[in-house]
Image (cartoon, rainbow, N blue to C red):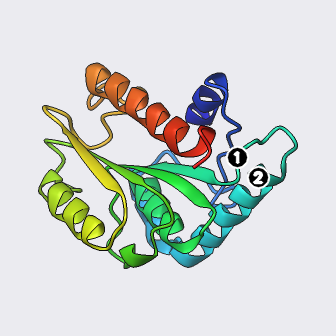
Amino acid sequence: EDVSRRFASEGFIALAPDLYHGKTTTSPDSAGRLLMELDAERAAKEIAAAGAYLLSRPECTSKKYGVVGFCMGGALAQLAATRDEKVGAAVSFYGGFKKVQIDWSQLAGPILLIYGELDSSVPPSQAQPLVESIRKLGKEAESIVYPGANHAFFNDARPEVHNGSASADAWGRTLAHLRENLVMGR
């Protein structure tokens, strides 16, 4: 919700769909179970429905919507961007989700892939090979690996991993990516 508010303060119409349908937890073990139980295909459809809702809003001036996600949400942003032609831009922060195969040939709009150098769960070594394979398909992709940054480095509610300089730069790049590909009317 906080990140959605940040987008709204930048002039975007923003929405954070509740893909867990009201279930919440603060326990890492429970969070892991919720993640394993998540139906990624259903989540992609719900993201598309949220995008369609945003596009139907009278204040929306874009013909396409953007998706941004973090960790599992980053993987869902990747999935949504390959499942809905109305996705005009995607940003995936350290996104990885082994149980879902992404068909990059269906990528609808440019994607920005963001990694932390010290991330062991979503290795930054996969960044450049992934970008190259996406580009070979004639799609637009860019990646950035932040030196000294861990997994979840953007999360300022977790001081043990938060990296302020990497977060600030990644936020600026995210906004620029969305503005270039959505606001400027690609």
Q: In this view, does 172 lie above or below 56?
A: above
Task: From the top left corner, tell me how far across and down residue 176 is, in percent.
Answer: 45, 32
In the image, is 71 to the left or to the right of 64?
left
For image coordinates 45% across by 40% down, the residue present is 177
| Residue 103 visible to an observer of this rendering | no
Task: From the top left corner, tell me how far across and down residue 7 is, in percent.
Answer: 60, 31
- The kind of residue tagged 2 is Leu
Task: From the top left corner, tell me how far across and down residue 1 is, in percent.
Answer: 62, 37
For this orientation, the residue located farthest to the right is: 58
Q: Do the residues labelled 2 and 1 touch (CB within 8 Å)?
A: yes
Task: From the top left corner, tell me how far across and down residue 65 is, in percent.
Answer: 63, 52
Give the mark nearer the N terminus: 2 vs 1. 2
Q: Is mark 1 on a helix, strand or loop?
A: loop
Q: In this view, does 79 lie above or below 115?
A: below
Q: Is mark 2 on a helix, strand or loop?
A: helix
- The kind of residue tagged 1 is Ser
User: Which residue is labeled 2 in the image?
Assistant: 55
User: Which residue is labeled 1 in the image?
Assistant: 62
| Residue 175 visible to an observer of this rendering | yes
- Res 123 quadrant in image: bottom left
In the image, is 81 to the left or to the right of 13?
left
For image coordinates 27% across by 32% down, the residue present is 161
Mark 2 crowdedness (10 Å alpha carbons): few <14, some 14-19, many ≥20: some
Task: Return the mark for residue 181.
Answer: none
In the image, is 83 to the left or to the right of 125?
right
